[in-house]
Amino acid sequence: MRALRRLLLPLCTAVAVTLPAIPATAAPAPAAPASGVASALDTLARQVAGSLSDHAVRDRLGAALLTGPVDLSTLRAGAALTGRAQAADRAVRTAKGLPESTGSLVRARLAADGMRAALASGATPLVAAAPDDDEDAAVVAYAPDGRRVLLDARRAPAQPVIVIEVDVAKAMPAGLDVVRRELARKGVTGTATRAGGYWATKVNAVRLSDDEEPWIKGAAEIYSIVGGFGLDGKAKVDIVQMPYLDHDGTTYYPNQLLVHFSAYKYNLADVVMMEDDGDTNYQQLASAIATALLTIFDLGVYIPLVDPILSAIPTSWWTDDPDYVDSWYTLSTGSSGRLNGAAGNGWLEVGPYWVAEL
């Protein structure tokens, strides 16, 4: 599915060919360098594995993991491990463009619930960093003696595996706040709204395709970039978190308001759905979107904004990582029923909703 997603993405630009051409925009952002998040997690995974040679550390971490994910910075399993976890936290915050006030983001969890019994019975676990590429054929894990072990990415091993990952449920709200502030600072989150009640688009149901992700991956964290023209005629976007969308292949019924048309000039808006699987840099995301949208001008007729938003995002975000999910063009105040995404990776079932004036 990830490979299919990359093949389908260029086709998204064909959806609105009958509409006016988009004015020339800045060249697409260059590919980002290798993820600092992935490097920090891999280093910590190797260090955690080495610390398991100390039976006191192994017992303390193992007992904590049996109850759920563990914040390694607060585990108190020895000063050395705590210091390494805190160093990884700093590296991850920097790589994701998040302030220090976000707090600790690196955590450990068991890769699968079925591994609890083996861990509880004293089996020696392996340690692996959450991968940043779902199409890797193998998962790199580390043993306490320092050995590098390659595991099948599609078949979970019987031996327990501790996964070192970013707590994206904690990182995303902080990251989206960064995006909103940066976009507001650059003038692409117009605040003007029409007086009185207004129409909105409500998501009644949503489903993303089953991507058969590796056993080591955790739940997704999904958000949508809603774009259109503000009442002042300038391109604007809103960021909408969709915290309930944890897994592909599952239908959710959120009754969530996605587009608020009180703030859009043409009663039309586009939606780009994204996923943070741990490596999103929110500062880069905000800067890229703002740079692209500030070059687009109101020509008196609606121009879809999906293409410039996608063009602004660094190429590696959808060639190596699954950050791009899908997009929907020209939602209107009258949009209703099931709407398939342009990339074929999911659908929304929507309906108009009247928001009464308070």
Image: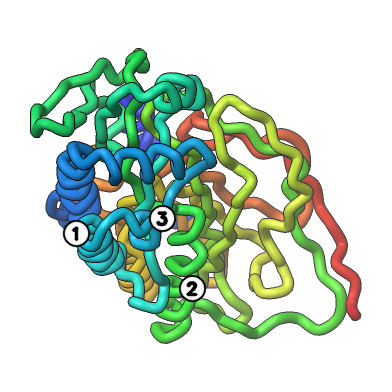
Which residue is at a point 58% across and 58% down the rendered structure image? 241
Residue 38 location (% of width, % of height)? 22, 47
The amino acid beneath tag 2 is Asp
| Depicted 296 relative to depicted 20: above or below | below
Residue 129 horizontal/vertical position (percent): 26, 39
The mark nearer the N terminus, 2 or 3, is 3
Tell me the mark number nearer the camera, choosing from 2 and 1.
1
List the residue tagged with mark 2. Answer: 177
What residue is shown with label 3?
A: 71
Q: Amino acid at mark 1?
A: Ala
Please give the name of the residue rendered at 53% of the width and 26% of the height, measured from the top-left corner.
209
Q: Earlier in the sequence, mark 3 or mark 1?
A: 3
Cα separation, mark 3 vs mark 1, equals 15 Å
* Amino acid on which disc 3 is placed: Asp
Residues at marks 2 and 3, CA–CA distance in whole angstroms: 22 Å
The 10 Å Cα crowd at callout 3, few under 14, some 14 to 19, many 20 or more, is some
Tell me whether the residue at label 2 lies in contact with that at label 3, contact meaning CB atoms closer than 8 angstroms.
no
Task: Please report whichever mark, 2 or 1, sits nearer to the chain's N-terminal start.
Answer: 1
Return the residue at label 1: 80
Q: Is residue 23 visible?
A: no
Residue at x-position 70% and y-position 36%: 252
Q: Residues within 10 Å of mark 2 (few under 14, many from 20)?
A: some
Mark 3 and mark 1 in contact? Answer it, CB < 8 Å.
Answer: no
Q: Residue at x 25, y 35 (%)?
A: 128
Q: Nearer the viewer, residue 38 or 338?
A: 38
**Front tag of 3 and 1:** 1
Camera-side mark, 2 or 3: 3
Q: Of 184 and 197, which appears nearest the observer?
A: 184
Query: Where residue 262 appears, x then y in whole percent?
Result: 73, 73
Which part of the image, by quadrant, shows the C terminus? bottom right
Label 1 Cα neighbours within 10 Å, binned few <14 / some 14-19 / many ≥20:
few
| 53 lies above or below 165 | above
